[in-house]
Image (cartoon, rainbow, N blue to C red):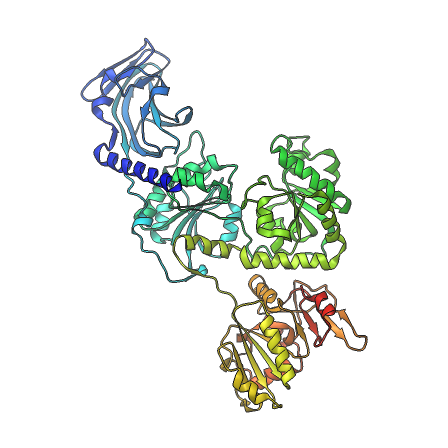
Amino acid sequence: MENLTVLHAEIERFQKEILDDLKPYFLDSRVIFNEKNWYSESDHIFLRSQDNQLVISSADTLSNTEYDGNAVNFLPETSLKILQGETFEVAFSGETTGPIHLSLLLTEYSHEDMLNTHHFELNPSSSRIKLSADTCRIGITLLVTGEGLGIIEGLVVKRIKKRGTAFLNKRPLQKAPQKISDLKMACIFDEFSMSCYQEEVKLITFTPDNWFDVLEQNPPDVLFVESAWQGNHGSWQYRIAKYKTQDKIPLIDLIQWCRDAGIPTVFWNKEDPIHFDKFIDSAVMFDYIFTTDTNMIPEYQKRAGHDHVYPLAFSAEPKLHNPIQTFNHRKNKVCFAGSYYANRHPERKQDMEDVLDMALPYGLDIYDRNYEKNKQGTTHFSFPERFESHIISSLQYDEIDKAYKGYKVMLNVNSVKHSPTMFSRRVFEGLACGTPVISNASLGVKKVFKDLVITSSDKKAFRMNLEKLMSDEDFYREKALEGIREVYLNHTYKHRIKDIFAKMGIGICLEAPKISVVSVVQSAEEFERILHYFKEQTLQPKRLIVFLDQFPGSADILNQYNNEHITCYVLSYMDQYSRLSDLVKERYIAFFHPDHFYGENYLLDLSFAIEYSKAEVVGKNCYFHHDIANKGLSQTSDDNEYSYVNDLSIDASISQTEMFRGERLYKILDMIRSCQSLNPYVKKGYRLFSTDKYNFIKNGKNLDQQMVDMIEK
């Protein structure tokens, strides 16, 4: 069925190309300037043909005249037939004498309804219009107001040639991987997307007036336009979405320029499915279409006439959405930031009241997006009275950390519940900040995050899990860590950019931190322990370097483990002038001490911190340690979790290898064996960042599994 849809679209495209060549002028002068092809119901309007011009004399204050393309009188519902999705260039020129005013009105119709109108004043220059994908006929009307004489010297409606998709047909696809940070992306974004994408790629922004000069001087790798309401700080307002009267010519010209230059064009409707109709006319002009709702893909394929349509969900940006502590303590409450609608989205309205009611017993703060409006009195955006005492204020975008990081739990309500891919971006962003999220029922949330996000499909289970989040610290921290991992592994803007370019046949390399694990062991038992910790690590890629003291079996270990992933050296053979950089080529280095315990996600969680903290050292300032005398676990203060600190131990951290440049290898190995502090490097200008307290136990070798399970999250 989909193949037939694409074939039908190809036939339509071929028809357009034939018409472009055989009949480029939709209306030509022979019929335009023939007075018999126009009629007016007014007795005060007179038309005559004269010297290939149309002369209009008016003695009325307001009249209109319509062109009859079939040499018969007609009403708008029997107007001129066209092919769907055509682009026309319209020129309307002439002169007037007296107070008479002439203008041209071009009206688009579907089979049943009027869709859009385009208004043209007498002007020597031409304008370009892109007809709606649903338009199948147009009406042309001359609007005549006032008394006087008007002469129409030119009225041209010309088809604009469109030879398929330049990128798809002509541009050789780039197969070699590129770094995301090297990509140049021309864009039309609203504020949220702009602030996120600019952290990952080189964004090129422009206005409808300067786009040509900007892109000529700095050609991009791709044009990426989203379903923008404002677009590049308001410069593209009313030019992307559909409005009754709008000027889409700059967008049409921009896309055509990209095609001529072999630059692929991408459209992302982040408003699907609710605002599909608002953006479909813009979407179909692009080479590739992405949608937040995978259910809309068949309709896009039908309208666009190709199958380059794919899902693209929201995501989180590590530099903006991360667990770095910005408040001393999280409030032991539930937080909701958003809007309430009393007069629309009835299912969302009921869901919101249900989840807010269930959150009330645990403490609830509401940040109302319409707070300022509602302060003036009750509106359609006012929360029900029982929630009014819980409303704090509104939040600006740069204050969103109050909701994302200031509370123990974040509440989310989706308007779209039955899409497998569309749900609020705040779910991704909140989880990335280490905040467990509770939500109304949502197919997409359940499909993507499974049990990571607690949903209200079962109210009894919802209450039980919310109670557990608020009262069970182990359960709460496990949810928080799992949320960070899931987002950072699969749902960042880097992942979305890679997916977009993959659909275009362009390979993009996601650079994971390359880490070497270094250890010093004095027995076969210690070696086996370090080897076990290393192999259990979920992070990839990684390399292990072990320095062996002389002990029974060390020669066998040396012979057995000497490959690209695991390398062993005899400690006593290391020349005292050797440098660590002679052996370690990876950018980052971690030091494992055989007396400690390292959980399977130890390196993985620290690698995330490398990305979002930009610190040269990340590690555990807060941790558990085995109290051998009392045969139990104790922990240091957790005040410094997710914070920049002045002290980390070398055996509980990952460092940039560059930090140790110029230092003797023996010094570094002695630091490992004696578990020394990295505080001296703070004075050299290096930053130290402490993550969570889990997945590491100081002196934790040979612990029973029950103790390990307590801290391995």
Q: Percent from the top left, x then y, of residue 32?
A: 24, 22
Name the residue furthest left. Answer: 51
The correct choice, above or below, for 654 with respect to 93 in the image is below
Residue at horizontal 59%, vertical 55%? 321
Name the residue furthest front. Answer: 1
Image quarter hosting the C terminus: bottom right
Q: Percent from the top left, x then y, of residue 444?
A: 57, 46
Name the residue furthest top. Answer: 43
Residue 323 makes an appearance in the image = no
Residue at horizontal 57%, vertical 51%? 448
Quarter location, residue 375: top right
Would residue 707 appear left or right of 40 to someone viewing this image?
A: right
The correct choice, above or below, for 62 with respect to 528 in the image is above
Q: As rendered, which of 446 and 382 lies closer to the eye?
A: 446
Image quarter hosting the N terminus: top left
Quarter location, residue 509: bottom left
Residue at horizontal 20%, vertical 23%? 30
